[in-house]
């Protein structure tokens, strides 16, 4: 039931003009697609706590201190409905820019570029994985989406709490781009992170997008990673979420 609710929540994501995409990527289609299983289990008691779980457990002050220690350029904002530790980025995360496609003047005001501090820590780790793949820009539809009037909970989850991000495009330093809607090409009953060879009709871009999603899941940065393989609502974006109180990690 939880996943159904999340899917419906993403239906409120604002849609913005698409970027041009370039299919020329470096990875061969014939490469064996060996990735982690769909559900990534929680760490054993003897293992170090997973990064996403540690971030989700931080208080606002603890999170702010870690942002400062990482020298992440940001502006701490006053608490607002649904979100307890809101921040706005004022620079890149580990060399990767995260932005909507709103005009520059609107970007400084839009709620869609506000994040819970704890999500920013996970995104900073994610940015390191992306830079290793040549990604320098991430175009998002939204992070925080203010809850409706009458919201009864002091702190929310998902987009209402600034703990989830919907990503539509990945721009690479060589000028190419990965467009989730155009390039992912989901297949019926697909388990995106199951081991095995790629399907015969896979493209380099579709494999690259799957590797990005599965690497984020196997690195245990986001408790939930939903892709176009999950349902039609997510046909044009990745939904990546940090969830307080959770210790399991799922990619679909």
Image (cartoon, grey):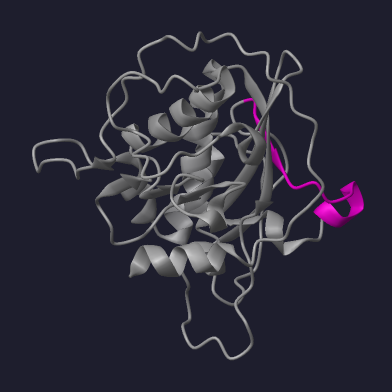
Q: In which quarter of the image is residue 22?
A: top right
Marks counted in the figure total 0
Q: Is 233 left, or right, of 229 in this rendering?
A: right
Which is more toward the observer, 54 or 189?
A: 189
* Residue 51 visible in rendering: yes
Q: What residue is drawn where x is 71% and y is 16%?
A: 173
The picture places residue 109, in percent across and down from the top left corner, at 81, 60
Asked whether 190 or 50 is in front, the reply is 190
Q: Which residue is drawn at 64% across and 72% down?
A: 146
Residue 12, compared with residue 217, is above or below; it is below
Please say if 226 is above or below 163. Answer: above
**In-front residue for pair 215/156:** 215
Name which residue lies at 76% across and 17% down: 175
* Residue beneath the point at 80% across and 31% down: 20
104 part of magenta stretch: yes
Q: Where is residue 186 in the image (x, y as percent from the top left)?
A: 49, 39
Return the x and y of residue 217 as percentages of the image width and height: 36, 37
Asked if residue 153 is positioned above or below residue 204 in the image, the reply reads: below
State the residue lying farthest toward the bottom.
150
Horizontal placement of 116 versus 187: left or right? right
Q: Which residues fall within the magenta stretch?
A: 95-107
> Which residue occupies the foreground of this view, 56 or 67?
56
Q: Can residue 64 be seen in this view?
A: no
Q: Locate the N terminus by quadrant.
A: bottom left
Residue 3, percent across and down?
38, 62
Query: Is residue 188 located in the magenta-colored stretch of the structure?
Result: no
């Amino acid at each position: 039931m939880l996943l159904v609710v999340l899917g419906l929540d993403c239906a409120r994501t604002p849609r913005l003009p698409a970027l041009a995409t370039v299919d020329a990527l470096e990875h061969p289609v014939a490469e064996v697609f060996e990735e982690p299983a769909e559900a990534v289990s929680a760490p054993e008691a003897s293992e170090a706590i997973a990064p996403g779980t540690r971030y989700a457990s931080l208080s606002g002050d603890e999170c702010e201190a870690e942002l400062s220690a990482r020298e992440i350029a940001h502006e701490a904002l006053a608490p607002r409905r649904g979100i307890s530790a809101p921040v706005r980025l004022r620079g890149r995360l580990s060399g990767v820019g995260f932005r909507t496609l709103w005009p520059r003047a609107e970007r400084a005001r839009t709620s869609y570029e506000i994040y819970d501090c704890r999500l920013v820590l996970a995104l900073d780790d994610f940015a390191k994985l992306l830079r290793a793949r040549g990604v320098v820009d991430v175009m998002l539809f939204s992070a925080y989406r203010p809850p409706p009037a009458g919201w009864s909970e002091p702190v929310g989850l998902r987009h209402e709490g600034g703990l989830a991000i919907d990503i539509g495009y990945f721009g690479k330093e060589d000028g190419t781009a990965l467009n989730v809607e155009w390039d992912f090409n989901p297949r019926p009953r697909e388990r995106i992170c199951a081991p095995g060879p790629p399907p015969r009709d896979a493209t380099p871009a579709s494999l690259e997008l799957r590797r990005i999603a599965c690497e984020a899941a196997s690195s245990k940065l986001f408790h939930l990673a939903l892709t176009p393989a999950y349902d039609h609502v997510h046909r044009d974006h990745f939904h990546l979420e940090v969830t307080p109180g959770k210790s399991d990690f799922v990619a679909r």
